Amino acid sequence: MTPPESEPPPEPASDAGTAADLVITHCTALVHDAGAGHGAHEGIAFVEDATVVVRDGRIEAVTTERVEVPAAEHIDARGQVAMPGLINCHTHSPMVTLRGIAEDLPVEEWFNEFVWPIESNLRERDVELGARLACAEMIRGGVTCFADHYFSMDTVAAVTAESGLRANLGQAFFSSQGAGGLERSLDFALRHRGTAGGRITTSLAPHAPYTVDDADLAATARLAREHGLPVHLHAAENRDQTEASLARHGRTPIEVLAATGLLDTDLLIAHGTGITERDLPLLARAGGRIAVASAPRGYLRFAWPTTTPVRALRDLGIPVGLATDGAASNNSLDVWEAMALTALAQKSAEGDPRWLTSRQALHHATLQSARAVGLGERIGSLAPGRRADIVLVDLTGPHTQPVHDLAATLVHSARSADVRTTIVDGRVLMRDRELLTLDVPSVVREMNERMPALTERGHGGRIQEYDT
């Protein structure tokens, strides 16, 4: 499927005498070197003392040659690594308002007794404040793009545009909402795709096979094909869901997706820790571009027995992107932490210290994640013609020195707080840790004032029942 917002081929470089948007000098650039091979290294390479030239929102050059190009802005990045911005492939950004609201609980109680009753209190202003705080957190953590799946997404789209971030947004729906749920999801996707100067793309967003019936899933698949839209949903989130689906319907959640035609769309599956061996042939035969988003911290928090089967999915050529899920279940939107946890959880799950390597983790955090959200031709690597979504990471701190293996330092020693500068489409959103597009103190003040009304659960209502 050709994405509806596919960009035109990169234009030839402008005349070197005209001013560039931005020139970054004296950095170490993380690049995806096709000549370096794959396997444990995944083509990840580092270019020392590099210069990155950005013009018209695109990367024009990554070079070790000294270039004399006038620029609107210049950044001397000595001691820093320039790398593609991280991508949060599955989150619910407004849920930062519920960070820490329900701790140390099984997922059923977490949903039914806390999250879904509280979400019934959400007003548009709560969503706006949550989205603002989430965007600020992601910018400070080196995230330049996120895939969001929630309600009141017109509000989230407006905040995203203001923040300067890139996003794929989907208006979530349940079958319990009636026909209007899917209609609103489609309306949002068609109105907002390609907005914010092309930084916003959209998806249809059914919640999950256990909250959206087969008829609505099939209708989603038809509309996705008709309108050239991808689909983003939760499926096979954990092994209990898979076993419950088999017991009730004789099919796994992935088999439900196949039967309803969703595997023939461009589909982003959130979590997938319940994907089983019997699902793999179906995923291999899928007619659409299938991807999975993995958020390992949440799986550890809920004590799920399995994690996303990254190795098996990789063998099928299915991109696995990194994610945080919402801050209500993950407590943070720190994709840097997700990168380290993915490497460690995969070693444990596979019983193999050689899998995942640090370079493989960086690959999943950058180019694999870009492919997962359908933007693999636009972002995810520092290369001429790509959109200039770049972060600068300071490695001069005591916790990142000495550097024997730069990839390992980035994955296992560096922290999101080491991100000094965040750039999207060539625009600096954070410079030397100073946010330039969002006012966090005012957001926090108002959010705290609204908390008593938001967290009230005495009404006894909930937006949905968690019963897989």
Image (cartoon, rainbow, N blue to C red):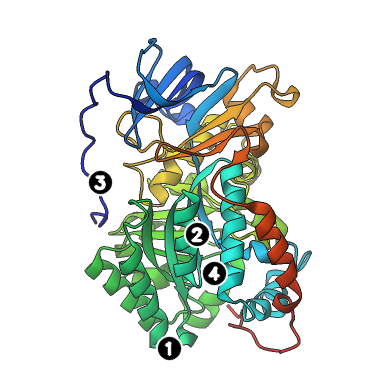
For this view, does 415 lie left or right of residue 284?
right
Q: Position of residue 6 (x, y in %)?
A: 25, 50
The residue depicted at 32 percent of the width and 68 percent of the height is: 191
Per the rendering, the mark at residue 159 is 2
- For the residue marked with disc 4, what is the amino acid? Thr
Please state which of the two labelled residues, at mark 2 or mark 1, is closer to the viewer.
2
- For the residue marked with disc 3, what is the amino acid? Glu
- For the residue marked with disc 2, what is the amino acid? Val
Q: Position of residue 205 (x, y in %)?
A: 42, 69
The Cα–Cα distance between marks 3 and 4, rounded to whole angstroms, is 38 Å
The Cα–Cα distance between marks 4 and 1, rounded to whole angstroms, is 25 Å
The residue depicted at 39 percent of the width and 10 percent of the height is: 66
Does the image show residue 5?
yes
The residue depicted at 27 percent of the width and 19 percent of the height is: 16
Please state which of the two labelled residues, at mark 3 or mark 1, is closer to the viewer.
3
Q: Which residue corresponds to mark 3?
A: 7
Going from the N terminus, do you reach mark 2 or mark 1 first? Answer: 2
Whether residue 128 is situated above or below residue 15 in the rendered picture = below
Please state which of the two labelled residues, at mark 4 or mark 1, is closer to the viewer.
1
Q: Quadrant of residue 242?
A: bottom right
In the picture, which quadrant includes the C terminus? bottom right
Q: Position of residue 351 (x, y in %)?
A: 64, 40
